[in-house]
Amino acid sequence: MPTPVSRRAALGGLAALGAAGVSGCTSDGGDRSPLRTGTPSRPPDDPDVALAATVLRDEQAMLDRVVATAHRHPRLAGAVAGARAAHRAHVELLTRAVPPDAVPVRPSPRPSPRPSPQPSPQGAPRVPDAAAVALAALARAEDRLAGVGRRSALAARSGPFARVLASMAAAASQQAVRIAAEGRR
C-alpha cells in the first residue's frame, strides 16, 4: 500500500523536477525547456512555500533590475541577456511552485501567461546614468542575491528544494562575475 505524500515531499518533488529547468540556463542567454507542471495544492503555511514566495519576490526584483538596466542602457542588453534569461527562468519556476494566494500578483511588464509577484516597496529599480556604473551596481545586486540564495538553501526543509535554491544562488553568483567582467571591458 503506497504511503501518502507530504506537502514537504510534494514541494521537494516539484523542486527536483524544476532543477532541470533552472540548471538548463545557458551562458549564452538561452534556456532550455522550462518545467511544465501545474501548481500542486499545498497550504501556504508550509515553511518551504513561504520560503519559495520570498525567493520569488527576490528573483522578480532582480529580473526587474536587469530589465530596467537593459532599457536604460540599450547597448548593455547583450551583456545582461544571460542574467535576464536566468532570472526569468527562476521566476517562472517559482511562480509554479508558489500557490497564488501565497504571493500578491501583478501583471508583468512583458506579457506572460503567468502572474508575477508584486514589485518591491521601493518601486522601480534605479539605474545609474553611466553604463559602467550600472553594470557594477547590477553585479553587486547579483552578488547580494547569491548570498540570499545560499542562506535560503540552508533554510529549506526539503533537500531537493534546497538544491534548487543552491542552483539559483550559483546562477546569481555566475551572473555577478560575468556582469562585472563586462563592466571592465
Image: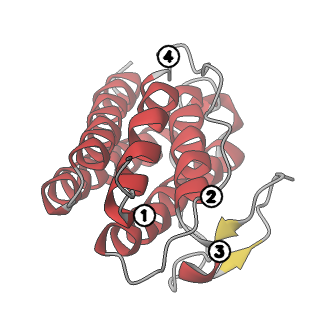
- Numbered label attached to residue 100: 3
Q: Is residue 81 above or below residue 121?
A: above
Quarter of the image that includes the C terminus: top left
Residue at horizontal 21 percent and vertical 46 percent from the top: 159
Which residue is painted at 24% across and 48% down in the image?
A: 162
Q: CA distance from mark 2 to mark 1?
A: 20 Å
**Residue tagged by mark 4?**
26
* Amino acid, disc 2: Thr
Nearer the N terminus, badge 1 or badge 3? 1
The Cα atoms of the two marked residues, 4 and 1, are separated by 21 Å
Q: Could you tell me if residue 42 is visible in this image?
A: yes
Mark 4, mark 2: which one is toward the viewer?
2
Q: Are marks 3 and 4 in contact (CB under 8 Å)?
A: no
Q: CA distance from mark 4 to mark 2?
A: 25 Å
Q: Residues within 10 Å of mark 3 (few under 14, many from 20)?
A: some
Query: Are the residues tagged 2 and 1 within 8 Å (C-beta)?
Result: no
Give the residue type at disc 1: Asp
Label 3 – label 4 distance at C-alpha:
29 Å
**Which is more N-terminal, label 2 or label 4?**
4
Q: Badge 1 is on which residue? A: 58
| SS assignment at label 2 | loop
Q: Amino acid at mark 4?
A: Thr
Do tag 3 and tag 2 residues touch (Cβ < 8 Å)?
yes
Name the disc covering residue 39, or none. 2
Identified by mark 3, the residue type is: Pro
